[in-house]
């Protein structure tokens, strides 16, 4: 199954390792990109990100909240 993580991006749910709320990290977008390996981070929003999605291959800064993303994942995998 797949989950939509931004307006135009989807991920295979089996590749998702963790979904972390931005407030839990207390990092700005610039700090998050610096903290995580730059080549492994995909910015999915021009504005503020609300969650970090960690997959087996990369990290994504998503404009969707972690609650919304988790709800979408569980809707696809009851």
Image (cartoon, helix red, strand yellow):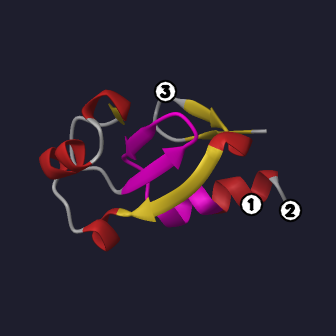
Q: Quadrant of the C terminus?
A: bottom right
Question: Which residue does the image show at 15% across and 51% down from the upper left?
Answer: 31
Q: Nearer the viewer, residue 40 or 64?
A: 40
Mark 2 in CB contact with mark 1 (< 8 angstroms): yes
Residue under pointer 2: 78
Question: Which residue does the image show at 59% across and 32% down from the upper left?
Answer: 10
- Real-space Cα distance between discs 3 and 2? 24 Å
- Real-space Cα distance between discs 2 and 1? 5 Å
Image-quadrant location for residue 22? bottom left
**34 in magenta:** no
Which of the numbered marks, if any, corresponds to residue 36? none
Q: Earlier in the sequence, mark 1 or mark 3?
A: 3
Find numbered disc 3 in the image and state the secondary structure of the residue it sits on: loop
The location of residue 45, given as percent across then percent down, is 30, 37
Dot 3: few (<14), some (14–19), or many (≥20) neighbours within 10 Å?
few
Which of the numbered marks, if any, corresponds to residue 74? 1
The location of residue 18, given as percent across then percent down, is 55, 57
**67 in magenta:** yes
| Magenta part of the chain | 51-70
Question: Which residue does the image show at 60% across and 52% down from the upper left?
Answer: 17
Q: Residue furthest right?
A: 78
Q: Is residue 55 above or below residue 23?
A: above
Q: Earlier in the sequence, mark 3 or mark 2?
A: 3
Dot 1: few (<14), some (14–19), or many (≥20) neighbours within 10 Å?
few
- Real-space Cα distance between discs 1 and 3? 20 Å
Q: Quadrant of the N terminus?
A: top right
Residue under pointer 3: 8
Mark 1 in CB contact with mark 3 (< 8 angstroms): no
Find numbered disc 2 in the image and state the secondary structure of the residue it sits on: loop
Find numbered disc 1 in the image and state the secondary structure of the residue it sits on: helix
The location of residue 14, given as percent across then percent down, is 73, 43
Q: Residue furthest bottom?
A: 24
């Amino acid at each position: 199954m797949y989950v939509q993580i931004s307006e135009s991006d989807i991920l295979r749910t089996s590749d998702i390792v963790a979904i972390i709320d931005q407030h839990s990290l207390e990092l700005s977008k610039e700090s998050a990109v610096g903290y995580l390996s730059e080549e492994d981070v995909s910015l999915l929003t021009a504005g503020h990100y609300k969650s970090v999605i960690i997959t087996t291959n990369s990290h994504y800064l998503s404009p969707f909240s972690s609650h919304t993303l988790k709800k979408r994942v569980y809707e696809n995998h009851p």
